[in-house]
Amino acid sequence: MNVNLIAVPKEFQIQPYKCDQYLVNGQLKTWKGNTTNVYSTIQSSNEAGEMVPTLLGSIPDMETESAIEALNAAEMAFQRGQGLWPTMKVGDRLKCMETFVEKMKEHREEVVKLLMWEICKNKSDSYKEFDRTVDYIIDTIDAYKNLDRKGAKFDKQAGVHAHIRRGPLGVVLCLGPYNYPLNETFCLLIPAIIMGNTAIFKPAKHGVLLIAPLLKAFQESFPPGVVNILFGRGRKIASPIMKTGKVDVLALIGHSSSAVALQDEHPNKNRLRLVLGLEAKNPGIILPDADLDLTITECISGTLSFNGQRCTALKVLYVHESLVNEFNKRFSVAVDELKYGMPWEDTFLTPLPEPAKPQYIKELIDDAVGKGAKVLNKRGGEVSENYCFPAVLYPVDKTMNVYHEEQFGPVIPVISYKEIDEPLDAMAASDYGQQVSLFGRDVRKIGPLIDTLANLVCRVNLNSACQRGPDVYPFAGRKNSAVGTLSVYDALRSFSIRTFVAAKDSPYNNEILETLLNSNESNFVSTDYLL
């Protein structure tokens, strides 16, 4: 879709944003090397009157030298557990985080505008992503206070006093995704640093410019070296960092192939903690007694929110043979009625941010059609420079690429089944196991199904689309879909380790412990109660 920049509402008009700074060791340094232009797939007219991708700005194309500089800064800030940040009082670390979130809120409009232009996320979802991220940080602060309160005591077992708390792991390499470049990234970065770790963070290829307005907020909120932010290609930055063996935690949301490749770079895999959110092929299973009105509404949201570019999207629909014709008819009409337009126009469907994605989606459609599937909706597969209109494909089988691949875009494969074992066996054989949506009402059927599904995935959604939130609930996956659990509470544990001080119960030790507690000489040994 093309746009006249002058016609864009004033508050969403954009001027090229030159990002020539990066954050290392508490300093905002100016990059003087090569740069990479950042474009939106939303096209506008250039000086020659030609319609071309809109230039949004530029970012540093950083080299290995800068990556090692950032690693050294993070390593020095952690100082093998002896640094200021990991030994700081919990309350003081939380004050730093509270300062950051207040500074972050000052850039809401700027970040939201870049979200709309960079990844073409609609206005409503862009504001929601920013606000949800702020709420996530606040909830994480509250969760850590609660965690700390529970640890602010001594236990006594078998004649031994123990003061048990959670401590940091070390240096974290944080790599976020393009589809939620703020929220999902911060769901890694925030719990990592709040627990006392230090971090090197590189934004994804798309959704990269929106980090630039927050650089100063990070610099002013945290001690030097705690957060280091780089820009550039993964092979120039992430790979050299991993090869050093100095990374203690790899935190990545992306594809399993990337995670495996980076793990392979690390020379000491036994010392590497993994916190990974990876791909999924979440199914919707529609039982014979499903409420079709409710099911279609949830399946529209589940398959096509943000054009299906979510790991939590419904990527295949299993429909019972008694319902499949009626479902297909009504669902196809509902898909064709969806409004497509620019992010700021309050539309549901928006352009795709990856230049090659429309062609990829078209190839999936053509492959399926060539092997016997039909495009059921009238507009399905209509292609432009930056979009492929959602296609409902039926019948889909194992011979088709869309059956196996995580399409991560607007194409919806539908499979008819006779016996419930068919979708269950397919899920069991799948390499993925994140979530499932189950539509029906007969508890005699639903009950046993839940018992099985709970062992195949990590979240069973009853008559509702797959989703991540609320953020206090666990977010995890089996097999290739995840390593570790992300949520407000679980992430704090994923980026830390239980450690404790122990002393035999004796008058000598008890006197020392009492004196230690009253002296405030230790930030770790403390029964201070955080309000």
Image: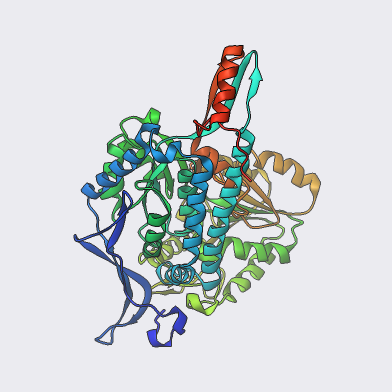
Residue that extends furthest to the left in the rendered view of this protein: 33
Can you give x and y, in whole percent of width and height, for residue 452 in the image? Answer: 67, 39
Can you give x and y, in whole percent of width and height, for residue 514 in the image? Answer: 59, 23
**Residue 184 position (above or below residue 474):** below
Residue for point 57% across, 13% down: 508
**Residue 272 position (above or below residue 73):** above
Q: Give the quadrant of the N terminus.
A: bottom left
Residue 430 in view = no
Residue for point 31% across, 34% down: 245
**Residue 130 position (above or below residue 23):** below
Residue for point 54% across, 45% down: 486
Can you give x and y, in whole percent of width and height, for residue 358 in the image? Answer: 40, 67
Residue for point 48% across, 42% down: 480
199 with respect to 146 (left or right): left
Near-viewer residue (102 or 338): 102
Can you give x and y, in whole percent of width and height, for residue 402 in the image? Answer: 48, 56
